[in-house]
Amino acid sequence: SMPRCPDGPGCTGPGGTQFTPSRLYDFDSYTTRSYVKQAFLDMFPDRKHDVNEHVDPGEFGVESSESRYVCVFVFVVSMMSELQGIWSLGKLLCSVPSTAESWIHYEVPAWAPKSHIKQVHACTELDFVKLAVAGMDIKWKVLNFIFVLMPKVLIWAGMLLAGTIFLMETQGIDNIVVNSTALGFVLCIDELFFELLTSDTCKKILQRIEAFPLFDLQYEEDMEDDAVLVRHMEKTMACSCFASVKAWSSMLPINLVLASGLWIGVMAYYYGTRCQLTEDGIWVSRSMYLPKGVGLTLFQAMLPTLFRPETEDEPYWTMPDRQEN
């Protein structure tokens, strides 16, 4: 990082010279200045020494590694709500019965005539129509798994990895904050499409669908208070070791632990796939290769680690050795 430069380890930039605050530029400025210097060298090859002495393109580098780590962690936390939605959808597909059942029911209370109920509660016929998640045929489960759940998982994973790379390769602190906000907007695109493109009828139906109960509490509801306490103590004392572990785990912030694990995982993925460790113990970029084409398949775009695009055999950039400024 910048506070330990120019004499500390890890202060060599992509141009091979040492970082200093006055020579640090963003990527666009650095590439432009490097292009100008290379143009002078090509036009005046006999004055190479003078060009190298008087034309300094500077260096490109990040201002603060710590700020990037914090922003990546915040980004991972913002992805947790989408992960919880995916988990809930998967649990729902596994929990609902695999037999076709009606999701629509017409229920009129039996305690009074329907006309009297309408008068007392000021309700309409639509209020007697109940929409609830029910059984689903196995073929519809398979279709929902393939065309709904799996795409959501792939998009979430691709967004997590792409967002991490995007933030880790952002140079300035101010740009990191802006990019973090932009990634938050990307996460809301599906809700935006739903709000703007879905019909009012569809929205009304989705609002009225009752949740599917994952467990039945009717047995406990019918029990006396003392019986419930006795049942709870019996289950608790059935296995003291398991009960102790379960009690301690219930006090842990599971979402924080999961977010921290994901953050460590994506950071390990970034450094493992895009960086290499030098003899000084500093992580630097791997050699860069130009792709042979400009097009990407769907799998190459979503899973570049598994489906790598073809690249040239020779790298166009490698980390240079240290040079004098």
Image (tube, rainbow, N blue to C red):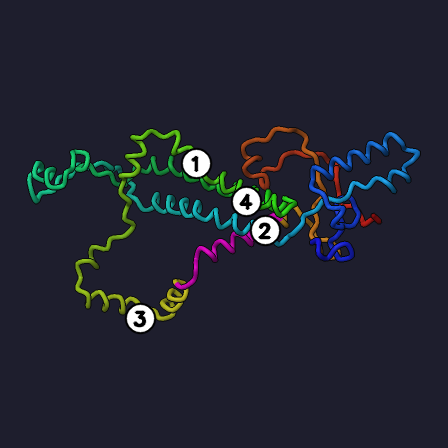
Report the residue marked by disc 2.
267
Q: Where is residue 279 in the image (x, y as percent from the top left)?
A: 75, 56
State the extent of the magenta-drawn residues as a range.
251-270
Q: Image quarter for residue 165?
A: top right
Front label number (3 vs 2):
2
Magenta highlight on residue 19: no
Q: Distance between the residues labelled 3 and 2?
A: 42 Å
The crowding category of the residue bearing disc 3, from other C-alpha atoms within 10 Å (few below 14, some 14 to 19, many at least 20), is: few
| Amino acid on which the number 4 mark rests in the picture | Ser
Towards the viewer: 169 or 306: 169
Question: SS for tag 1?
Answer: helix
| Amino acid on which the number 3 mark rests in the picture | Met
Front label number (4 vs 3):
4
Q: Distance between the residues labelled 4 and 3?
A: 48 Å
Front label number (3 vs 1):
1
Q: Where is residue 49 in the image (x, y as percent from the top left)?
A: 91, 40
